[in-house]
Structures are given as C-alpha cells and as structure tokens.
Image (cartoon, helix red, strand yellow):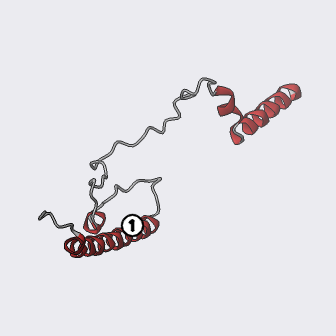
Amino acid sequence: MSFFLVFVAVLLAAVAILAGTDLVPRLLRRRDGEQPFDDGFDEPVASLPAVLLPAEASPADVDRIRFAVGVRGYRMDQVDQVLDELRDELARKDSVIARLRNELENRAPEHAPDRQA
C-alpha cells in the first residue's frame, strides 16, 4: 500500500511540475510554424468596424478615432497620448505646408519668365 501512495505522490509531483512550466506547450509545438494546438483563446470577433485613417488625414480625423475595448487591450491613456501627439503633429505639418504653399504662390509671379517675345 505504501508503494502505491509513493507512486501517486511522484505522479502528482510530475504533473504539477509539467503544469507549472511551459514544457508541455514546447513539446506540442509544431516545427513548420503552424498553430501548435487550440488553446481555447480565439481571436475576439470585432464588434466595431476597422479603425482606419483616410489617405489625407487631418487632425479632426484623429479626434474621431474610437477603438474597441478588449480584455487584453492597450492602456487607454497611452493610446490617447499617442493619438494626441499624432493629431498635434498632423496639425503642425498642415500649417507648415499651408505656409510654404502661400510663400510659393506669392513668389511665383515675381520669378515667372516673360512670355511676350
């Protein structure tokens, strides 16, 4: 009877060690890069449309972005900070582009060659 109890104790210890380490998932991984096994954590189904900026994004477009909230999602304060910085950068670039276009339009008549020959 004591042999059986020692065997059960060793078996339970082995199961606890295997469960506590990542040895089992490493053994079950496939070498060809495919998913090794179904771990039960499927990708969540998106309940909102994809978050996309238009090709010519403006600061107002960044303000209108909304992300879905997920259990394992990003920290909202960090996302908000990055979006605020992106909005400010877009606004700064838009103002520089507008200023340069204005300078170019003002300079163009001065340097235009005479075509009255």
Does 105 sit above or below residue 51? below
- Say which residue appears at 40% left-offset and 53% top-offset: 70
Does 18 sit above or below residue 56? above
Residue under label 1:
86
Instruction: Between residue 102 and residue 19, name the one nearer to us.
Output: 102
- Say which residue appears at 34% left-offset and 55% top-offset: 68
Give the SS element for disc 1. helix
Instruction: Between residue 54 and residue 28, name the one nearer to us.
Output: 54
Residue type for callout 1: Leu
Q: 16 left or right of 101?
A: right
Q: In terms of image quadrants, where is residue 23?
A: top right
Q: 24 left or right of 81?
A: right
Q: From this viewpoint, which residue is outermost toward the front?
A: 117
Instruction: Between residue 82 and residue 21, name the one nearer to us.
Output: 82
The picture places residue 1, in percent across and down from the top left corner, at: 85, 26
Q: In terms of image quadrants, where is residue 18?
A: top right
Q: 80 left or right of 34?
A: left
- Say which residue appears at 82% left-offset and 30% top-offset: 5
The picture places residue 86, in percent across and down from the top left corner, at: 39, 66
Label 1 crowding class (10 Å Cα cut-off): few <14, some 14-19, many 20+? some
The picture places residue 24, in percent across and down from the top left corner, at: 68, 32
- Say which residue appears at 30% left-offset and 61% top-offset: 65
